[in-house]
Image (cartoon, rainbow, N blue to C red):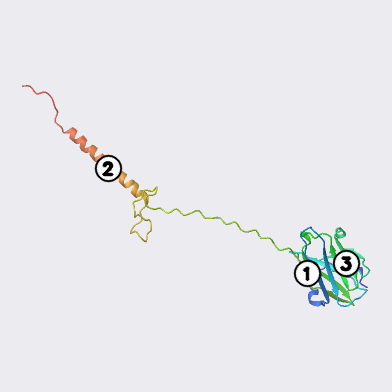
Amino acid sequence: MVSHTMIPIASLPILLCLFLCTHQLKLISNSLPKIGSGPMTLYCEIESEDPNVGVYWFRHKKGSESPVSIVYVSSTSRSMYKDQNDKNRFKPNASGNRYTLEIGKFEATDQGTYYCLINKNSVLHISPGLQLMYPEVTTPKTTTKAPPVRVTVAGDSCNCPPGFSEDKETTSFDLSCDLYVWAPLAGLCGFLLLCLVITSMMLCFRPPTGRTGI
């Protein structure tokens, strides 16, 4: 008869049992329902029937370090929960060589890998892990288009002359568009200044005009 004093021990990590315990248990379940839409039943079966065997139920949540005990049910269907708040959600039962664990309404927080464990003739038997996980929903990444690269061509706002390129591989020297804007303006200003100087000189050396007596 399994002693109820094993309940605290059952809450310890059972990873070591994966190497020391024998696998004579089979753990199956019905199909996974939608989140919060219906119950979930797990079936733990042992090869040979033993009326004096109880079963422990464990769950290993994703991201947790080790499995945690949910409930122990004796061969007489007497249940002992680690967390009393689970009484209304988890319903264990023992019948012959089959043990069941019914989850009233399977929620997202119930996801994880489940195990059943029995102590038969002082030998621990643990089932392979049964993973009950919903597929992860991946959100497609939004792609942002890079702004188009502005290319300076002939006739644009820079007023560069046709055939001008700032590519060093195609020109012998690197000139900016500002040179082609300011150079003609500077030449025009110089030409106007020169005209003004010549006009002033011509006015200065012009002989005075006046009446001459007869």
* Mark closer to the observer (1, 2): 1
Q: Secondary structure at mark 1?
A: strand
- Which quadrant of the figure has residue 209? top left
Residue visible at 26% across and 39% down in the picture: 193
Q: Is residue 163 above or below residue 41?
A: above
Which amino acid type is shown beneath numbered disc 3?
A: Tyr
Q: Is residue 155 above or below residue 214?
A: below
Residue type pointed to by label 1: Leu
Q: Quadrant of the C terminus?
A: top left
Which element is circle 3 on? strand
> Callout 1 environment at 10 Å: few (<14), some (14 to 19), or many (20+)?
some
How far across and how far down the image is residue 108, in percent?
76, 59
- Give whichever of 66, 53 is nearer the camera: 53
Residue drawn at 79 percent across, 74 percent down: 18
State which quadrant residue 100 falls in: bottom right
Evaluate whether residue 82 shows in this view: no
Q: CA distance from mark 1 to mark 3?
A: 18 Å
Task: Answer few, some or many: residues within 10 Å of disc 3's Cα (few below 14, many 20 plus, some between 14 and 19).
Answer: many
Image depth: mark 1 or mark 3 in front = 1
Q: Position of residue 99 (x, y in %)?
A: 87, 70
What residue is drawn where x is 78% and y is 69%? 130
Quarter holding the N terminus? bottom right
N-term-proximal mark, 1 vs 2: 1
For the question of whether residue 194 can be seen, the reply is yes
Disc assigned to residue 130: 1
Tag 2: amino acid: Gly
Q: Is residue 19 above or below residue 80?
A: below
Q: Is residue 172 left or right of residue 22?
A: left
Q: Determine which of the numbered discs, if any, sits on residue 72 in the image.
A: 3
- For label 2, the residue is 190
Secondary structure beneath dot 2 equals helix
Q: Earlier in the sequence, mark 2 or mark 3?
A: 3
